[in-house]
Amino acid sequence: RVVTDSFNSLQGSYTQTRRSGGTIGTNAIRAGSISVRDRAVIHGDLIVGPQADPATAIRVRESAVVTGQRRAATEALRLPCPPPQPPAGVHRQRRGRVAADETLTLDAGTYWFDTLKTEEGASIRTTGPVTIYVTSDIDFRSTSVIGAGGRASDVTIKVLESSEPSIEGTSTFIGTIYAPCSIIRVRGRSEVYGALIARDLRLQGSARIHYDEALAEDS
């Protein structure tokens, strides 16, 4: 089943600091803007856009659990779509691909790939904080993406066009994916430690999303 919660990497590990801050939010106001089902457990709030009626905009099936509030936001979040382009001087690479059981190591800095895809057992590591711009497709298959410090602030991925980034299998992603024009899918037994920003977020299978509260303190 899908589970969301939170922790704070500035205070300790996920196991040491786990708490109920796995909030899911949207600017949308239509009926069914947030739908929780299939025994999912949301350790946090469900928040819909301003002027929305939470009674109709949020749908929670009987088998699901939400520990926090169900409410409307006081104001909408500004999420420009498309997001800002990479800074001048960043070299654009046609594609990034990591073969099965191989490791891609990125030095601290800014990168730009048209696509970023990995095969089962691959890993991406960094020697310092990185920002990765991806023009369209992201496909992580049973892959680990972990920055040098093991914190979500070490890896930021920004998706420039409308696409469907996918994290699946038994992937572990520690970082932030900012994709305000895209549909992000997390499925299988994948785990995300950080944050996901998307036009549409779809969590399936036994996906786990652990929001790192340190991101708010770092910003």
Image: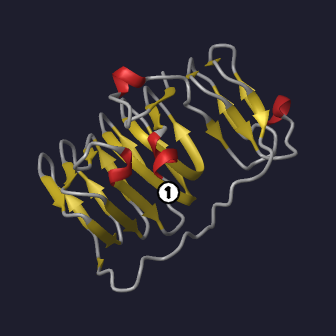
Q: Closer to the camera, 77 or 182? A: 77
Q: How many marks?
A: 1
Give the vertical position of 53 relative to 41 (above or below).
below
Q: Is residue 105 left or right of residue 203?
A: left
Q: Is residue 85 left or right of residue 152?
A: right
Q: Position of residue 194 (x, y in %)?
A: 43, 42
User: What residue appears at the point 36 percent right and 29 percent down from the top-left corner?
Assistant: 189
Q: Position of residue 77 (x, y in %)?
A: 69, 54
Q: Is residue 102 visible?
A: yes
Q: Residue furthest bottom?
A: 89
User: What residue appears at the point 34 percent right and 54 percent down from the top-left corner?
Assistant: 155
Give the vertical position of 57 relative to 63 (above or below).
below
Q: Residues within 10 Å of mark 1 (few under 14, many from 20)?
A: many
Q: Residue furthest left?
A: 102
The residue type indicated by label 1 comes to: Tyr
Q: Closer to the camera, 40 or 196? A: 196
Q: Quadrant of residue 201?
A: top right
Q: Position of residue 73 (x, y in %)?
A: 77, 42
User: What residue appears at the point 21 percent right and 43 percent down from the top-left corner?
Assistant: 120
Give the vertical position of 200 relative to 172 (above or below).
below
The colour scheme applied to this rendered structure is secondary structure
Q: Closer to the camera, 91 or 213? A: 213
- Element at label 1: strand
Q: Closer to the camera, 39 or 180? A: 180
Q: Is residue 164 visible?
A: no
What residue would you read off at disc 1? 178
Give the vertical position of 153 relative to 4 (above or below).
below
Q: Is residue 50 left or right of residue 68?
A: right
Q: Position of residue 7 (x, y in %)?
A: 44, 30
Q: Quadrant of residue 25?
A: top right
User: What residue appears at the point 31 percent right and 38 percent down from the top-left corner?
Assistant: 172
